Image: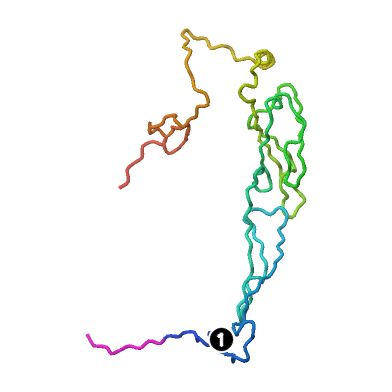
Amino acid sequence: MTPQGPMLAQETTECSACKGEGTVFKEKDRCKKCKGEKTIEEKKVLELYIPRGSIQGDRIVLAGEADESPGQEPGDLIFELHEVEHETFHRAGSDLQAELHITLAEALTGFNRVVLTHLDGRGISLNVLQTPNQILRPDQILKVPGEGMPIKRSEVMGDLYLIVKIEFPEDGHFENEAVAKKLRELLPGPKPAIQVEDIDEVEFERDAGLEGFGAGSGDPRAGGEWEDDDDEHEGPQCAQQ
């Protein structure tokens, strides 16, 4: 092996005086505001226009409003829209969704009233007429065309979907047996009795949940979660080598 002497390497660094620009201003010629830095910090009020119908993730670009650097064109200032969750409405595209809370009596007999306040302050009124065999059921969906969000660059509006939520009477509301009997006479009766030879009257718990259903068994269906996994029903497969 041949011995080698000391090796020299050349390295290029930025000039600390001119910062690589090739020019240096004398102290007396420097700008009093920027002190020779060629840029200054300032606050600027920008006006941002958000088009009607804008959605989550839309971007609004203000051209040339980014930070400036000497000898370079300023970049753009980009805003990305983020929708704040609303306490009443949920949005998907141009459609809106909200819960429609009604009483049990309204579900059975109909109603005519303002059901919610829209985003623009208008009251949305529904006239639901009671007709034979036409009652409102829990989680039934009423679609109101044209009462959703605006669609960008058009005069068309999305739709409003109302999910029926029936508020049942509080416990003890029908303490009067005469009222309870009247209800039993008005409402449909139970289905025909199940015919069996042996009958066992059992105790029960009110307001039970499914948290304890199959607890500790290791069964994937425990807790009321019935999963339909296609992989579990596939036949045996050949081992790979």
Name the residue carrying label 1: 21
Question: In terms of image quadrants, where is residue 147?
Answer: top right
State the image coordinates of residue 180 (x, y, percent, origin top left).
65, 15
Residue at 73 percent across and 24 percent down: it is: 109
| Element marked by disc 1 | loop
Relative vertical location of residue 133 with respect to residue 156 in this rendering, above or below: above
Quadrant where the image shows the N terminus:
bottom left
Question: In terms of image quadrants, where is residue 2?
Answer: bottom left
Residue at 38 percent across and 32 percent down: it is: 216
> Camera-side residue: 218 or 208?
208
Give the extent of the magenta segment.
Answer: 1-10
10 Å crowding of disc 1: few (<14), some (14-19), many (20+): few
Q: Is the magenta stretch mostly helix, strand or loop?
A: loop
Relative vertical location of residue 99 with respect to residue 39 in this rendering, above or below: above
Residue 233 drawn in magenta: no
* Identity, as a three-letter code, of the amino acid under mark 1: Glu
Relative vertical location of residue 164 with respect to residue 8 in this rendering, above or below: above
State the image coordinates of residue 91 (x, y, percent, origin top left).
65, 46
Residue at 72 percent across and 57 percent down: it is: 51
